[in-house]
Amino acid sequence: MPSFASRLIAWQRTHGRHDLPWQGQEAYRVWLSEIMLQQTQVATVIPYYQRFIASFPDVKTLAAASEDEVLAHWSGLGYYARGRNLHKAARIIVERFNGEFPRKFEDIVELPGVGRSTAAAVCALAYHERRAILDGNVKRVLARYCGIAGWAGEKKVEQLLWQQAEALLLPGDVAIYTQALMDIGATVCVRSRPRCAACPVQADCVAVQTDRTAELPTPRPKKAVPERSAVFLLLMHGNDILLEKRPGSGIWGGLWCPPQFDDEVAAREWFERNGMEARGGEKLETFTHTFSHFRLHITPLKIELARKPLRAAEPGSVWLEVEEALGAAIPTPVRSMLQELTRRMG
């Protein structure tokens, strides 16, 4: 029987994806796509990638941009540390490598936000270097094909998967093989209801032969998802709204948000402490935003101010027209609140 790799390569040439905008591109664009694709679906990434490349066509342009500009392009894509790390990495590449994307795996893996699999993917896809990858799709394919049980987040399970990823590599055609692994995981060996009949390696897939495709890979152990609440003050003066820049680390680090509080009492105390005077206000409908590790129940309080206070806050605050604020580096739930304000101002 032909090898696992050769069967995947043959399948990819006929059935794989060939029209992704970063395919066959140089290392910078492959790296950008790999960072965007971490924990995000291809269909979601493509328009972001295209807008990003239009504004930042190379490492030097990205490095020269401000963090606000970069995060504004990232706004809505989530996991904002990826955008911040991308910007930091671009500046490192300009400083250390004269703006040329590094060629060595050892240099790439040291960049902020880049792990072993991402660095290997850049080396394989852009430089045709023989490197094994192990992203989420590949973990699922190998867990089923090799019959590896256990949650991939456990170190010993991940080590087994890396061993198999290395063992299944063949010399030559590494870029096509790497793309084939990604494609088979994304389109055939999917999480639920995998299309095993269309899979080129199902004949010797352990999960198929032992009827365990529903069990493998072993899911993450379930934990109760914490519930949190927050109150956002939507401080308005005419069509202008007050936004504050969040600290560089943590949830929504470096993004612009309305002032946020744990509850209405804390919000009211802050409002009074800053000598603000309300001309009117209303409580908007509470909604829920789900993060990977908790759910946040957000209550927006819209307050029309009698006058615009001169507020200088750390790390920064700004008054923007709502339409202008929608183009700033803001997280998804803030965008939802601003869109609701726009609808109301209609």
Image: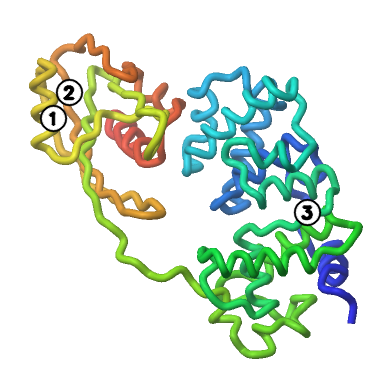
User: Which residue type does callout 1 highlight?
Assistant: Gly
Marks 3 and 1 sit apart, C-alpha to C-alpha, by 59 Å
> At 67% across and 31% down in the image, what residue appears?
53
Q: Name the residue under label 2.
A: 304
Looking at the rendered image, the disc whose residue lies closer to the viewer, 3 or 2, is: 3
Q: Position of residue 289 (x, y in %)?
A: 33, 49
User: Which residue type does callout 3 highlight?
Assistant: Arg
* Secondary-structure class at tag 2: strand
How was this image coloured?
rainbow
Mark number, residue 281: 1
Which is nearer the N-term, disc 2 or disc 1?
Answer: 1
- Dots 2, 1 in contact, CB < 8 A: yes
| Mark 2 crowdedness (10 Å alpha carbons): few <14, some 14-19, many ≥20 | many
| Mark 3 crowdedness (10 Å alpha carbons): few <14, some 14-19, many ≥20 | many
Mark number, residue 337: none
Looking at the rendered image, the disc whose residue lies closer to the viewer, 3 or 1, is: 3
User: Which residue type does callout 2 highlight?
Assistant: Glu
Q: Name the residue under label 3.
A: 131
Q: Position of residue 90 (x, y in %)?
A: 64, 27
Marks 3 and 2 sit apart, C-alpha to C-alpha, by 58 Å
Asked whether residue 241 is in view, the answer is yes
Quadrant assignment, res 315:
top left
> At 67% across and 28% down in the image, what residue appears?
54
- Dots 3, 2 in contact, CB < 8 A: no
Asked whether residue 55 is in view, the answer is no
> At 60% across and 43% down in the image, what residue appears?
36
Which is nearer the N-term, disc 3 or disc 2?
Answer: 3
